[in-house]
Amino acid sequence: MAVVQEPEIPAPSVTAADAAEPLVSPVNSHNEWDPLEEIIVGRLDGATVPSDHPVVACNIPPWAARLQGLAAGFRYPRLLVEQAQQELDQFVTLLQALGVTVRRPDAVDHRKRFKTPDWSSRGFCNTCPRDSMLVIGDEIIETPMAWPCRYFETHSYRTVLKDYFRRGARWTSAPKPQLTDELFEDDFRIPEPGEPMRYILTEFEPVFDAADFVRAGRDLFVTRSNVTNRMGIEWLRRHLGPGYRIHEIESRCRTPMHIDTTFIPLCPGKVLVNPEYIDVDRLPDVLKSWDILIAPEPNPINDRLLKITSMCGKWLNMNVLVIDGKRVIAERHHTDTLRALEKWGFEPIPCDLLHYAPFGGSFHCATLDVRRRGTLESYFD
């Protein structure tokens, strides 16, 4: 019997790409305290007074809102920018001296007008990457922010984001909101003390700022605010899935916006809270085993121009950046906070960033920690 020999099938060739090592994401950050290796720091170039809109004005006093409306769309005064820039440069130098890799967004002209089918606006600035992007493990999530002037803010970070993606990071964008009138309460007014809490946002669509969340491994904490609605919190809960838990922190602030002057985890078992905004007896049950550190009253700021132009409340003394669970960068002006951190067993590193307040915050706001040396853990029972 003749034997029919099957044709030989050539073995698949091995290309250089096949032989390459698997990609290791440069993005890896699970909490607010693991040793910091890489960070994005905001930029002041092109900063523009935010365009007039009720969601922008609702968190500031009426007289300040009128002033902001008159200046909307104009460049920030050079005096404000120069003072803040000097402090920001020193902060970046400090981070690099501590061995942290610093990445920056592209410079952008925020005065350029842009539009959607429903509205048009000028921009704001890219001083606070903490607002527009949320890092969960190896994933960066672009957030659906409620301020129209911040609609395209993450475009200034695209050079960095594309680099991270090519090197193995996951990159997600939450659904872009429409930001039409249906999202905003047309008769909104700030609730008086004793009145039920209310917010300018409806539940028309999901919106949230990343700065309304802080991370503690498999547990995240969030405040509902005038830039984060329940639908936004639920979107993130479903997106992250059952491997994470999101706990809502009840704030007594009448004009809530961002959690990082209200509630900041500093290391496993210790969280810094704002005594004006937080009732410690109403904190989530998972925190019962943690030490609740009560932030001292901020030291007074006598700079009259800073009082008028600051976009933030007085509690920026809480807006610290943890380097490694022990060392904490904090504002040099707030000496009572520096002493309190020492008393609680931390090593405060004083730095100046007081003049960044007109652009949206301080050390935590001005940064986005991209890589911290650590793994995903659960810090609660």
Image (cartoon, helix red, strand yellow):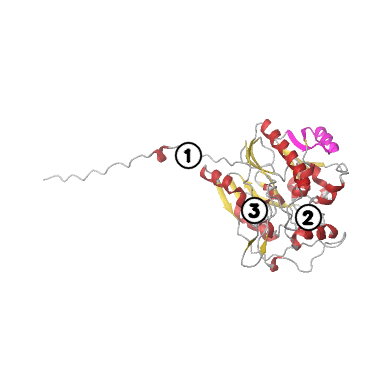
Asked where in the image residue 271 lies, by quadrant, the reply is top right
Distance from Cα at disc 2 to Cα at disc 3: 21 Å
Q: What stretch is highlighted in magenta?
A: 326-350
Whether residue 309 is visible, yes or no, is yes
Distance from Cα at disc 1 to Cα at disc 3: 32 Å
Vertical side of 219 occupied by 53: above or below: below
Distance from Cα at disc 2 to Cα at disc 1: 43 Å
Q: Is mark 3 on a helix, strand or loop?
A: helix
Q: Which of 152 and 218 is in front in this view?
A: 152
Residue farthest to the left? 1
Q: Which amino acid lies under the numbered mark 3 shown in the image of this protein?
A: Glu
* Residue holding disc 1: 22
Q: Which amino acid lies under the numbered mark 2 shown in the image of this protein?
A: Pro
Of callouts 2 and 3, the N-terminal one: 3
Asked where in the image residue 356 lies, by quadrant, the reply is top right
Quadrant (top left/top right/bottom left/bottom right) for the N terminus? top left
Residue 361 at x, y percent in the picture: 75, 47
Of callouts 2 and 1, the N-terminal one: 1
* Residue holding disc 3: 153
Q: Is residue 34 found left or right of 329 in the rendered image?
A: left
Q: Which amino acid lies under the numbered mark 1 shown in the image of this protein?
A: Pro
**Picture mark count:** 3
Q: Which residue is drawn at 41% across and 37% down?
A: 19
